[in-house]
Image (cartoon, rainbow, N blue to C red):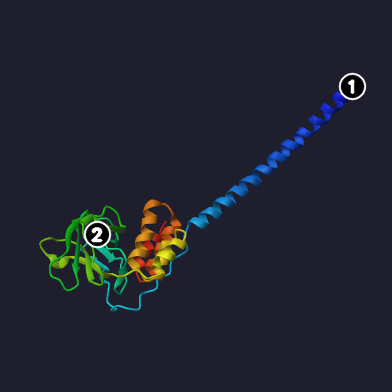
Amino acid sequence: MNNLKKMALSALIALLPFQAGAAEVSKPAQEKTKQAATASNVAKATPATPTYKPPLRGAPAGRVGGGTRGATDRESFSLLALAPDHIGYTVQDQPCLYWYISKPTAYPVELTLTERNAVKPLVETTLKAPDRGGIHSVCLADYGVKLRKNVQYKWFVTLVTDASHRSKDILAGGIMSLVDAPPSLQDRLKASAGNATSVYAEEGLWYDALGALSSMIDASPDNTELRKQRAALLEQVGLNEAANSDSRP
């Protein structure tokens, strides 16, 4: 009996190195499986690149100003309103507006919002001087302003480089309008699995598409895939310089 116990114990000990080796071999396989699952989850969580389909209605003119202009003999800025070159639409009565500046500055930036044919602005305020180059936002909800349906609004951002000589201002702006939501919009949003940006873009709702994507970037500022998607969206309306700022590492 003792001999049998010894033989069984010897057999068990002989198996141990093999089993340990098998465990070591299985760890890389497990890690690869985890990595593949993680990559799959990231792919599912990152929406597809949105395709903006401009609305059929509306006048062609929409974006104004922008481009590079000298503030002084030694300094120049590029200021862009992130608006399409036609009237941009939204289904939100208090959308956020986005603009781009090529570099930080201590010069003040003014925001102006008016109804297209009105004289008195609905909003006329000075924003915080941009402490970085890139894309910035301002939301109408912060000023208690609500858009009215089917009214065209002009909005501008103005870099004031010399308060005594306003002819030196650098100005950029766009035109927007609050419209009725397409009949299928809510159903499409519910079925979009978090990809609201593409739904808005395909429905021709520029400000909502840009706002949805920018909100995701604000929540995950290091997500390069989201920034690439915004860059692609901006390129579709000719805002290449602003797009490049999102494409840079």
Residue at x-position 29% and y-position 78%: 58
Kind of residue at disc 1: Met
Which disc is residue 1 wearing?
A: 1
Q: Residue furthest top?
A: 2
Q: Above or below — where is 247 with respect to 36?
A: below
Q: Which percent across, then down, holds residue 38?
A: 55, 50
Rendering coords of residue 153 (x, y %): 22, 69
Q: Residue at left 83%, top 31%?
A: 11
Task: Count neighbours of disc 2 (C-alpha within 10 A) and say few if under 14, some if 14 to 19, many if 20 or more.
Answer: some
Residue drawn 26% across the image and 58% down it:
138
Disc nearer the start of the sequence (1/2): 1
Q: Is residue 72 left or right of residue 182?
A: left
Q: Residue at x 80, y 32 (%)?
A: 14
Q: What x and y, as percent, mark residue 178?
A: 28, 68
The disc at residue 155 is none
Would you say residue 107 is visible in this rendering? Answer: no
Q: Position of residue 145 (x, y in %)?
A: 21, 60
Considering the numbered disc 1 on the image, is that residue within a helix, a strand or a loop? loop
Left-right relation of 62 to 44? left
- Name the element at disc 2: helix
Which residue type carries mark 2? Leu
Residue 55 visible somewhere in the drawing: yes
Quickly name the residue at label 2.
Answer: 140
The residues bearing labels 1 and 2 have C-alpha atoms spaced at a distance of 89 Å
Nearer to me, 176 or 189: 189
Q: Label 1 neighbourhood size at 10 Å, few (<14), some (14-19), many (20+)?
A: few
